[in-house]
Image (cartoon, rainbow, N blue to C red):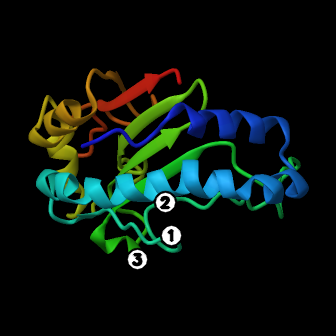
């Protein structure tokens, strides 16, 4: 895989954080399109075969609308912060059943100045759900499983985090450690 994310991506996001308003964004939308959106969509398209090797039921969808990339526009309807734009670029690589059920495993990529990371897991895995779709995913991440090791190889060194303290750490509904990488940009 080639280099997708240049310093210009992070420069734009830093500037957006300082100028998070419609007027500034409209003047600089061409930079967003060329330095943030296009490289992220190219990464998603090129990542699809690698993701398929991890598990064929995960989807890397390079469509600009309705695909893996999160939109730049914030939903401010119920927020005290009325900033119209997100100051990070991100994507979610969902299980193929995500269109029918949001309680499915997935991978997440987060690009933000000073806080870049990847995450994987099922954050609701211990909420009482016994979905058979999540069990193989969780088993693959527990104790150095195949899925976890593939993600570690793809994304490099990791730190590990577990779910909430109230979630069981052993047994059939255990929440096990999942890889997370943080790196300053």
Q: In the rendered view, tell whether residue 29 sits above or below residue 13.
A: below
The quadrant the N terminus occupies is: top left
**Pointer 3 or 1: first along the chain:** 1
Q: How far from the left and from the top, in percent, is residue 97?
A: 31, 73
Residue at mark 1: 64
Q: In the rendered view, tell whether residue 92 sits above or below residue 132.
A: above
Q: How far from the left and from the top, in percent, is residue 164?
A: 46, 33
Residue at mark 3: 99
Q: Say which of 122 and 33 sits in front.
A: 33
Front label number (1 vs 2) = 1
Can I make out residue 171 in this image?
no
Q: Are marks 1 and 2 in contact (CB under 8 Å)?
A: yes
- Circle 3 — which element? helix
How many other residues sit within 10 Å of disc 3, few (<14), some (14-19) or many (≥20)? few
Q: Say which of 38 and 183 sits in front.
A: 38
- Circle 2 — which element? loop
Front label number (3 vs 1) = 1
Q: Is residue 12 left or right of residue 109?
A: right
Residue at mark 2: 69
- The disc at residue 107 is none
Front label number (2 vs 3) = 2
């Amino acid at each position: 895989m080639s280099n997708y994310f240049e310093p210009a991506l992070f420069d734009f996001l830093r500037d957006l954080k300082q100028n998070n308003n419609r007027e500034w964004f409209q003047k600089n939308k061409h930079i967003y399109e060329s330095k943030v959106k296009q490289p992220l969509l190219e990464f998603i398209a090129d990542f699809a075969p690698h993701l398929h090797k991890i598990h064929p039921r995960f989807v890397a969808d390079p469509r600009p609308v309705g695909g893996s990339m999160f939109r730049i526009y914030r939903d401010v309807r119920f927020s005290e912060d009325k900033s119209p734009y997100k100051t990070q670029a991100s994507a979610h690589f969902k299980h193929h059943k995500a269109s029918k059920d949001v309680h499915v495993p997935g991978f997440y990529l987060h690009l933000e100045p000073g806080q870049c990371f990847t995450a994987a897991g099922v954050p609701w895995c211990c909420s009482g759900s016994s979905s058979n779709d999540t069990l193989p995913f969780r088993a693959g991440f527990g104790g150095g499983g195949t899925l976890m090791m593939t993600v570690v190889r793809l994304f490099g060194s990791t730190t590990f985090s577990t779910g909430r303290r109230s979630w069981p750490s052993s047994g059939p509904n255990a929440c096990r450690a999942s890889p997370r990488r943080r790196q300053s940009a």
